Image (spheres, rainbow, N blue to C red):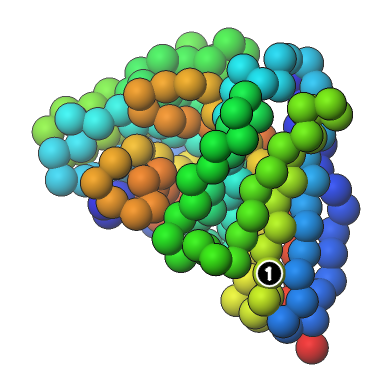
């Protein structure tokens, strides 16, 4: 199962950022999102399409419809600059846990 | 919750590496442990999963026959051994906690272990 993300997204501080994750009928799957700062381990920021783990700011939200899942960061901050990866589980493929190619969010 | 991994390794082609991941702050046997690797500049790649509860394992086909994942419940430690190392196995290897779920995800990660394979 292939997940497609734009390589890069740029946004000014205080503006919203949207990062997409495309996949065939992805709305039928649960999508999880991770933030990875340079040299750090990934951090879960959204699971089950739109659930925020404790400690993740309300600025982070997610949605999933049709062939595209979306991570939205409202009011982007400099500290949000990172790579973002989407991930799904697909029992019919190997490996069943699949990551997207990642999107580099640059805060201008 | 913390997952603390062993230190960086440098190995020659054909050798084996064993990475440890010591968990704390939660009931070790109540969550699965997945291993995910990430080559430089690449996306994360899932390698496999193990259950500390009963020792069950599932490996990605790509690593079948070369990887073994185990757990020691007495020390809350998970291990990943990769054999017959090649240069393209050079990557950061992460352990990650996996809650029981109909759609698996990784809610806590170790800090990563850099494995360098070079002659």
Please provide percent x and percent y for residue B76.
79, 28
Indicate the quadrant where residue B92 lies: bottom right
Identify the residue position indicated by label 1 in the image.
B83
Circle 1: element type: loop
Q: Does A12 appear above or below B31? A: below
> Which residue is at a point 74% across and 46% down the rendered structure image?
B79
**Residue A63: x percent and y percent?**
27, 23
Residue closer to the observer: A19 or A95: A95
Residue at point 78% right, 52% down?
B19
Observer-nearest of A95 and B58: B58
Q: What residue is shown at x 72% (from left), y 37% (from top)?
A: B71
Residue B62: x and y, percent?
A: 46, 65
Image x and y of residue B86, in percent: 65, 79
Return the residue nearer the eye: A93 or A105. A93
Foreground residue among B45 and A58: B45
Is B12 located above or below residue A18 in the figure? below
Query: How crowded is the residue under tag 1: few (<14 C-alpha within 10 Å), some, or many (20+)?
Result: some
| Vertical relation: A61 (above or below) A4 | above
**What is the total number of numbered labels drawn onto the structure image?**
1
- The answer to whether residue B56 shows anywhere in this view is yes
- Residue in view at x 34 percent, y 54 percent: A94
Left or right: B113 with respect to A53? right
- Left/right placement of residue A40 relative to residue A103 reads right
Chain letter of the residue carrying label 1 = B
Confirm whether residue A41 shows in the render: no
């Amino acid at each position: 199962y292939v997940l497609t993300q734009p390589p890069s997204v740029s946004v000014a501080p205080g503006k919203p950022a949207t990062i997409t994750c495309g996949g065939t009928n992805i709305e039928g799957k649960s999508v999880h999102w991770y933030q990875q700062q340079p040299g750090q381990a990934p951090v879960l920021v959204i699971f089950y399409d739109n659930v925020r783990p404790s400690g993740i700011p309300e600025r982070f939200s997610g949605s999933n419809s049709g062939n595209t899942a979306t991570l939205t960061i409202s009011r982007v901050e400099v500290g949000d600059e990172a790579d973002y990866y989407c991930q799904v589980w697909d029992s019919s493929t190997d490996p069943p846990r699949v990551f997207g190619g990642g999107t580099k969010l640059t805060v201008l | 919750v913390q997952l603390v991994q062993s230190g960086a390794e440098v190995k020659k082609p054909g050798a084996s590496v064993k990475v440890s991941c010591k968990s704390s702050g939660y009931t070790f046997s109540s969550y699965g442990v997945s291993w995910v690797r990430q080559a430089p500049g690449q996306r994360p790649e899932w390698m496999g999963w193990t259950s500390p509860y009963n020792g069950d394992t599932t490996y990605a086909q790509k690593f079948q026959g070369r990887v073994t994942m185990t757990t020691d419940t007495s020390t809350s430690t998970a291990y990943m051994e990769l054999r017959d190392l090649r240069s393209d196995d050079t990557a950061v290897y992460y352990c990650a906690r996996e809650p029981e779920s109909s759609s698996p995800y990784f809610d806590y990660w170790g800090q990563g272990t850099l494995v360098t394979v070079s002659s």
